[in-house]
Image: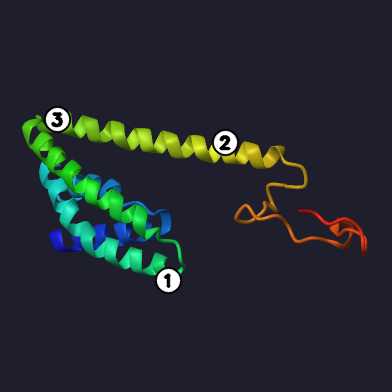
Amino acid sequence: MEIVAAIVIGLLAGTFGGLFGIGGGLIFVPTLVLLLDLGQVDAEATSLLAILPVVVAGTWRQHLYGNVRWRAAAVIGAVAVAGVELGVLTANALPESTLRRLFAVLVLFVAAQLAWRAHSATRARASRPGTSRRNPPRSGRPAAATDADEPPAGGPSRP
């Protein structure tokens, strides 16, 4: 049963990691606690190791699309090593119930931030002329120009 649960957790975390760009911890930790009955510290430690193949595969696929900012990732990763040391020391010093509550607050904060951004983007898109819910502009790029948008031949051009 533990292997089946681990396979399900891996599929969910991999799918959500690729879809939403989440590191897996938001999926791995709660499911390891709930499905495999791990303690909070054990789930967090297991998540750190389990995420390695997800990170490699996800980064490679995103790289093929040209979406990876290597310099920023290298700086963040290098500094995060010091942060993870501090985090591990803190996690092992706190009572498990406190750590679980802190994790829940983090998840709620992330969820609230995502909901706020989605709400703000929807309102901003609705307030722009020429856009609708059914036909939003893609990737922030302007819609294709029509003949009416083009300047007359020999006339002034836009900068």
Three-letter amino acid code at the position of disc 3 = Ser
On residue 120, the disc is 2
Residue at horizontal 16%, vertical 28%? 98
Q: Few, some or many C-alpha atoms within 10 Å of disc 3 (few <14, some 14-19, many ≥20)?
A: few
Three-letter amino acid code at the position of disc 1 = Leu
Residue 133 as seen in the image, left or right of residue 26: right
Three-letter amino acid code at the position of disc 2 = Ser
Alpha carbon separation for disc pair 1 and 2: 30 Å
Where does label 3 land, which residue?
Answer: 97
Q: Is residue 33 visible?
A: yes
Alpha carbon separation for disc pair 1 and 3: 42 Å
Where does label 1 land, which residue?
Answer: 64
Nearer mark to the viewer, of 2 and 3: 2
Residue 42 as seen in the image, left or right of residue 74: left
Residue 126 as seen in the image, left or right of residue 158: left
Residue at horizontal 40%, vertical 61%? 68
Nearer mark to the viewer, of 1 and 2: 1
